[in-house]
Image (cartoon, helix red, strand yellow):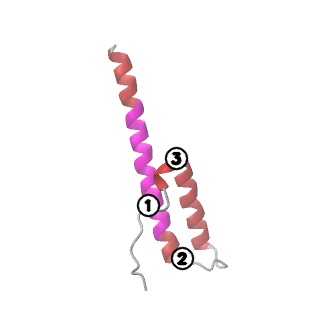
Amino acid sequence: MPKLSRGRLDGLHGMHSFTAAELFALADKLQQQALDPSSADDPRWLKRWAAKVRRLAAQKKVAHESKVRQKESRRAGR
């Protein structure tokens, strides 16, 4: 039987290919599933994944804002 290992947000699921807005929407969807009593998934698992996706989305948002500021400062320096 194969050993189970923890997956990463990148890699298998390709979370780095999504925008921050898409990741925030996914986190909200996971959070709603966690609150839904008819959901067959474990609410604690869904909440953990929602938190992980939300952290990644926040990092992507900050990185994007930083890149925009760098571009603007380079243009202002010319």
Q: Is residue 65 above or below residue 18?
A: above
Specify the label residue 43 is tagged with: 2
Q: Residue at horizontal 42%, vertical 68%?
A: 7
Whole-angstrom CA distance, mark 3 to mark 1, is: 13 Å
Q: Residue at horizontal 54%, vertical 76%?
A: 43
The local crowd at label 1, few if under 14, some if 14 to 19, many if 20 or more residues have their Cα within 10 Å, is: some
Q: Position of residue 36 (x, y in %)?
A: 64, 74
User: Disc 1 marks which amino acid?
Assistant: Leu
Residue 74: quarter of image: top left
Q: Which range of residues does the magenta coloring cover?
A: 48-68
Q: Residue furthest front?
A: 1
Specify the label residue 9 is tagged with: 1
Q: Residue furthest right?
A: 38
Whole-angstrom CA distance, mark 2 to mark 1, is: 19 Å
Earlier in the chain: of badge 3 and badge 1, it is: 1
Q: Is residue 3 magenta?
A: no
Residue 62: quarter of image: top left
Q: Nearer the viewer, residue 16 or 53?
A: 16
Whole-angstrom CA distance, mark 2 to mark 3, is: 25 Å
The residue under label 3 is 19
In the picture, which quadrant includes the N terminus?
Answer: bottom left
Residue 63: quarter of image: top left
Q: Which is in the foreground here, disc 2 or disc 1? A: 1
Q: Nearer the viewer, residue 10 or 41?
A: 10
User: Disc 2 marks which amino acid?
Assistant: Pro
Q: Secondary structure at mark 2?
A: helix
